[in-house]
Image (tube, rainbow, N blue to C red):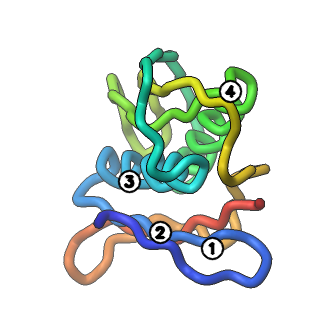
Amino acid sequence: MPYEILEHTADLRIKVKGKNLQKLFRSALEAMAHIMLPNKEKNSSSSKKISLSASDKTSLLIDFLNEVLTNANIEKKVYSEVAFNKLTDNKLDAEIHGFPVDEFKEDIKAVTFHEADIQKNKKGLFETNIVFDI
């Protein structure tokens, strides 16, 4: 599994890993979707284009997840997949894919910068912790 849910006193904390930035971002999105609505069958799919810039790859990941979360709350959808047109350390152009839901199992208020710091581990994988404010 490319992510694991870690214990945290007040919020929800995960660790995500990926062979490259695309896989890391996909794993983080998949984890957030699972938290919002685990074991949900996807009825119909819709997509939305997003473009973001940030000062570094960690900020870009947190901004990406917050952008997806904002769209999820506005449109009452869970976005669980992403197709990247461009992904660098500080720029992202992508299309997110999601499905409508009646309600979220877990109400994520925000994706925080607390503990987020994308690094390469000893195995050469990108990894970071992410804390969700719930």
At mark 3, the secondary structure is: helix
Tell me the quarter of the picture where residue 4 sits: bottom left
> What amino acid type is highlighted by mark number 2?
Thr
Q: Which part of the image, by quadrant, shows the C terminus? A: bottom right
Residue displayed at 38% across by 32% down: 82
Q: Amino acid at mark 3?
A: Ser
Callout 3: 10 Å neighbours few (<14), some, many (20+)? Answer: many
Residue type at numbered disc 1: Glu
Q: Circle 1 is placed at which residue position?
A: 115
Q: Which mark is residue 27?
A: 3
Question: In terms of secondary structure, where does tag 2 sit?
Answer: strand
* Label 2 sits on residue: 128
What is the spatial separation of the Cα atoms under label 2 and label 3, in whole angstroms?
Answer: 11 Å
- Say if residue 93 shows up in the picture: no
The answer to whether 45 appears left or right of 53 in the picture is left
Q: Nearer the viewer, mark 4 or mark 1?
A: 4
Mark 2 or 3: the one toward you = 3
Mark 4 and mark 3: Cα distance apart in space? 21 Å
The residue at the point 46 percent across, 16 percent down is 47
Q: Determine the image quadrant of residue 133.
A: bottom right
Residue at x-position 39% and y-position 66%: 3
Specify the amino acid type for callout 4.
Lys
**How many labels were placed on the picture?**
4
Q: Could you say where residue 131 lies in the image, as x and y percent from the top left?
A: 65, 66
In the displayed structure, would residue 127 be above or below residue 28? below
Picture coordinates of residue 58 (x, y %)? 53, 56
SS of the residue under disc 4: loop
x and y percentages locating residue 106 in the rendered image: 69, 54
> Between marks 1 and 2, how big is the CA–CA gap?
8 Å
**Mark 3 / mark 1, whichever is N-terminal:** 3
